[in-house]
Amino acid sequence: QVQLVESGGGLVQPGGSLRLSCAASGFTLDYYAIGWLRQAPGKEREGVSCISSSDGSTYYADSVKGRFTISRDNAKNTVYLQMNSLKPEDTAVYYCAKLVDGSNCPTELYDYWGQGTQVTVSS
């Protein structure tokens, strides 16, 4: 059974940091690209970052470039999103998602999603 389990969200002050984790099961992570997406209340869902399955290339939305870093640990079957210099506008539910077989970053088609983890940036 394919599952993506997210953790690491919470409340943080502006300028602070959080590290999100996405633990995968039911498939071998290194064969697939994984994306992080977010959705804020009243806003459309947007892609935040993606890490490819081929050469490990990483991609970031302009709004998070220089602040967020995506990485993967294939031995642990886990993808991470390190978020630094957080801003109130980063507040959202963050999801990790598995790209379908044959798809890769930055063009992303997803077939499985995590449950989402809440990130709140507020003073």
Image (cartoon, helix red, strand yellow):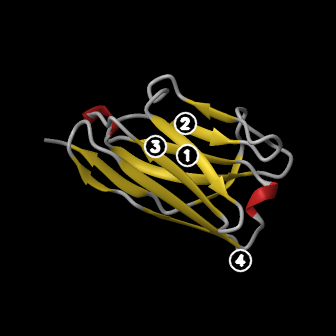
| Upstream in sequence: badge 2 or badge 1 | 1
Give the alpha-carbon distance from disc 4 to disc 1, as whole Å. 21 Å
Circle 1 residues within 10 Å: few <14, some 14–19, many ≥20: many
Horizontal side, residue 58 vs residue 121: left or right: right
Q: Please state which of residues 1 and 35 is positioned toward the viewer in this rendering.
A: 35
Q: Are marks 1 and 3 in contact (CB under 8 Å)?
A: yes
Query: In percent of the image, x 78 and y 40: which residue is there?
Result: 104
Classify residue 84 as left or right of residue 56: left
Q: Earlier in the sequence, mark 4 or mark 3?
A: 4
Label 2 crowd bin: few (<14), some (14–19), many (20+), radius 10 Å: some
In the picture of the structure, the residue carrying the numbered disc 1 is 36
* Residues under numbered marks 2 and 1 in contact, where contact means CB atoms less than 8 Å apart: yes
Task: Name the residue carrying label 3.
Answer: 38
Instruction: Check disc 1 and give the amino acid type.
Output: Trp
Where does residue 28 sit, x and y in percent of width and height? 78, 66
Residue at horizontal 35 percent and vertical 44 percent from the top: 92
Quadrant containing the N terminus is: bottom right
